[in-house]
């Protein structure tokens, strides 16, 4: 992959899915996309890019996104966020739910589902079954393959080995091939595909948004726009949880108050 080919591909990828491919990643991009080019029988990277631009490969944008991103996730990753969520649920959510209101939570960039299911488990441990019927969790990702796994709720031994037995007994069902999330928790979560830089279909605001280790794939300008869009989807007094390596830009910081490590409340 020449520098010119990389630059052309990087510009296209940024325009379509927002990913920022830095020049030092050229070798990695080349190694990952070479497999796609070969499998499609194309003569080279420019032919691949031309086919994408002409929409001659309608299913390839998703394959391209999968090749360029890494789905790293784990149950209760960055555990302090779930401790904070539990405190917020006991202090604020419970009262709202008792009044018959809904609590709506968005897991953006949910990968194979560990994050939204961790949210659901946290809430189940501190709210009544009646209250849980008024909780709605939306989980989105650009990758439909990981969404299919998330919907199934089935996780292998390696994916659940760090969970306490008490958690497995309460929230999972033992099956051949691993552990499956309980039906009650699966019913709490709706999984939908979503490209974060495209228009969003959501019409109602969220009580809390988890957008963790997602915007690091974008450049600073795109990140700033995303934070503003996400904050616009959070109701006043709602909560935002971001990844440990991410930072809000100055404009976004003016709209929130820090309530903990990479945890914010909308002013």
Image (cartoon, rainbow, N blue to C red):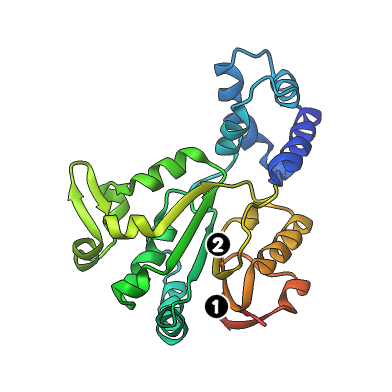
- Please, is residue 170 above or below residue 139 in the view? below
Q: Tell me: residue 162, above or below residue 128.
A: above
Q: Residues within 10 Å of mark 1 (few under 14, many from 20)?
A: some
* Quadrant position of the C terminus in the picture: bottom right
Pointer 2 residue: 212
Residue drawn at x 77%, y 74% is 250
Q: Earlier in the sequence, mark 2 or mark 1?
A: 2
Residue with the mark numbered 1 = 261
Furthest residue toward right:
4
Please say if 138 is above or below 54: below
Left or right position of 90 against 19: left
Mark 2, mark 1: which one is toward the viewer?
2
**Residue at screen point 44% across, 59% down:** 115
Looking at the image, which is closer to me, 220 or 167? 167
Task: Say which element carries label 2.
Answer: loop
The circle drawn on residue 91 is none
- Give the residue drawn at x 58%, y 24%: 36
- Which percent across, then down, holds residue 20? 71, 47
Foreground pick, 62 / 22: 62
């Amino acid at each position: 992959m020449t520098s010119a080919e990389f630059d052309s591909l990087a510009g296209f990828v940024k325009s379509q899915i927002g990913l920022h491919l830095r020049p030092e990643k050229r070798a990695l991009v080349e190694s990952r996309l070479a497999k796609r080019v070969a499998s499609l029988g194309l003569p080279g990277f420019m032919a691949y890019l031309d086919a994408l631009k002409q929409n001659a490969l309608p299913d390839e944008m998703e394959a391209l996104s999968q090749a360029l991103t890494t789905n790293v996730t784990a149950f209760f990753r960055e555990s302090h966020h779930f401790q904070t969520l539990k405190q917020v649920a006991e202090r604020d959510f419970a009262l709202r739910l008792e009044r018959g209101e809904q609590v709506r939570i968005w897991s953006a960039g949910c990968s194979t589902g560990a994050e939204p299911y961790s949210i659901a488990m946290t809430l189940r441990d501190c709210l009544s079954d009646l209250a849980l019927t008024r909780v709605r969790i939306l989980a989105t990702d650009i990758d439909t393959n990981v969404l299919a796994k998330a919907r199934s709720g089935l996780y292998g031994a390696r994916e659940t080995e760090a969970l306490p037995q008490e958690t497995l007994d309460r929230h999972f069902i033992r099956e051949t091939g691993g552990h499956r999330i309980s039906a009650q928790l699966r019913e709490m979560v709706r999984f939908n595909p979503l490209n974060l830089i495209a228009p969003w279909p959501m019409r109602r605001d969220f009580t809390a948004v988890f957008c963790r280790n997602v915007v690091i794939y974008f450049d600073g300008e795109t990140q700033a726009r995303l934070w503003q869009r996400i904050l616009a989807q959070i109701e006043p007094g709602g909560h935002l949880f971001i990844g440990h390596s991410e930072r809000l830009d100055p404009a976004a910081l003016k709209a929130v108050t820090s309530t903990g490590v990479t945890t914010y409340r909308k002013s």
